[in-house]
Image: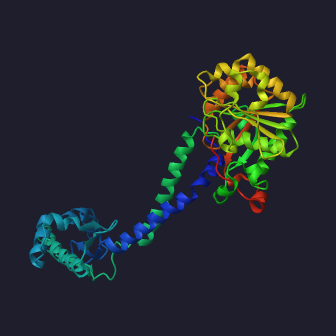
Amino acid sequence: MEEINIGDFFRYLKHYILAFAIVIGVAVVGVFIYDNSFKKPIYQAQTTVVIAKSDGLDGSAENINEVNASQKLASTYSEIAKSELVLNHVIENLGLHTTVKELSKNVTIKPVNDTSILAITVRDLDARLSATIANEIAAVSAEEIKNIYKIENTTQLSVATTPESPANNTLTRDVMLAAIIAALAVAGFAFIKFYFDDTVKYSEDVEKTIGLPVTGRISKGDVKTRKVGGELIAENLPKAIVSENIKSLRTNLQFTAVDKELETILVTSTNASEGKSFVSSNLAISFAQADKRVLLVDCDLRKGRVHKLFNITNSKGLSNLLAGDLKSFGKYIHPTKLKNLNIITCGTYPPNPSELLASQKNKDLIKVLCRYFDIVIFDGAPVGGLADSVILSSLMDETLIVVRDGATKKADLMATKSALEKVGANIAGVVFNMVNRNNSSKYYNSYYYGAPEQND
């Protein structure tokens, strides 16, 4: 069985605060409405009868023995009191419209501990009738016991009175139980999801469990600014939390290149819709803002969408360039309205993307591009099941793996890492995308705008 980290579980449980509130609220309101509107009030009346073999007790050994005998027979007396013989007489005497079987369900007769006293309890929807039935059972059973055992001394110690409030008025208890059961149900559901959840989370020690450092963290977006920032947050909202996260990622990457100048970066992911295009585009903008001559190349020759993010034509792109003459590469470079940032789109989707990326032409192209630009960022296809980015990674200075917080499977990330390591890729680390705002800096939460959700 996998070891459970209690601290991680309670942090995970925070995501269910709203679920706790809703489920507990519904349960409490439901119980309150049921108890007050639908639950039938049941009244309970009780009387007690003492049975002895003689009229008086003087403390003699004979009388003590009689008391002991009465105590031992108390259970027998209770069976007689609840017998069909007694209950039939009660029904006839009171003119009840019920059967012995139905009446017996609402009658409890048992001896009081270590005594010859019988406690007769009756429950009924009618408060007055419950007391009447209890007193009648006491009278009839005493008479029948006297007839069977020739016992003359039977005394009704207490007379059943009409109860003033229902015996099943348990609203407080029911509300508390409903709240506890609802809370346990939500916690149980959360625990099951937590235990079987195989996704990578920012709160975990990824370096320890996966063996990869965390190079960056991109916060989850703010719905209010989606229309303002679009996906190019670093350009449109330079003071947004996400923009600050991208700047931190840029700085971290620069520190990873200790032995040589960082020139080429591949941004990939394990699967689609984890945000690699969002990260690569904003990272390119961030480097351009730092006065670097930047080229963003869309190497996803299957579903590339960088041209959509920057609203650039895709009639001529990387696939067309690799199929043509490299000397005319300048015709395929699209300038943007942002200073220092240029783009090569993916171009026409070819039938053989892996072969194009593995070609000598592509290797030569990378060398040529590095002569004209300070940083070349390649937006690759997802690694999962494809060779495209695995091929490219062996040609790059650094490779970034974008994972979506709480969505990317650990097994997928491990497979991606293994595939890249087999070709000798230099993995800079993992970039967590869509990290929950609770994990973001309080400073930035207070003073900066948020950012929209990101697609692949």
Vertical order, 305 against 59 (above or below): above
Total numbered badges shown on the rendered structure: 0
For the N terminus, the quadrant is top right
Towards the viewer: 51 or 349:
349
The residue closer to the viewer here, 194 or 383, is 383
Residue 406, how many percent across, how many down? Answer: 62, 43
Residue 419 versus residue 47 in the image, above or below:
above
Q: Is residue 225 found left or right of 114 in the rendered image? A: right
- Residue 43 position within the rendered picture, expressed as x and y whole percent measured from the top left: 29, 76
* Residue 82 in sight here: no
Residue sitting at the far top: 360
**Residue 242 image position (x, y, % from top left):** 74, 50
In-image side of 283 versus 168 (left or right): right
Decide if residue 438 is on the left or right side of residue 176: right
Estimate the x, y position of residue 396 in percent, counting from the top left. Answer: 78, 26
**71 is higher (above) or lower (below) than 137:** above
Please state which of residues 93 and 351 is positioned toward the viewer in this rendering: 351
The residue lying at 23 percent from left, 82 percent from top is 128
Quarter of the image that includes the C terminus:
top right
The answer, for residue 174, to whether it is visible in the render is: yes
Q: Residue at x 77, y 48 (%)?
A: 245
Colour setup of the view = rainbow
From this view, report whether residue 129 is shown above or below residue 339.
below
Q: Residue at x 44, y 63 (%)?
A: 27
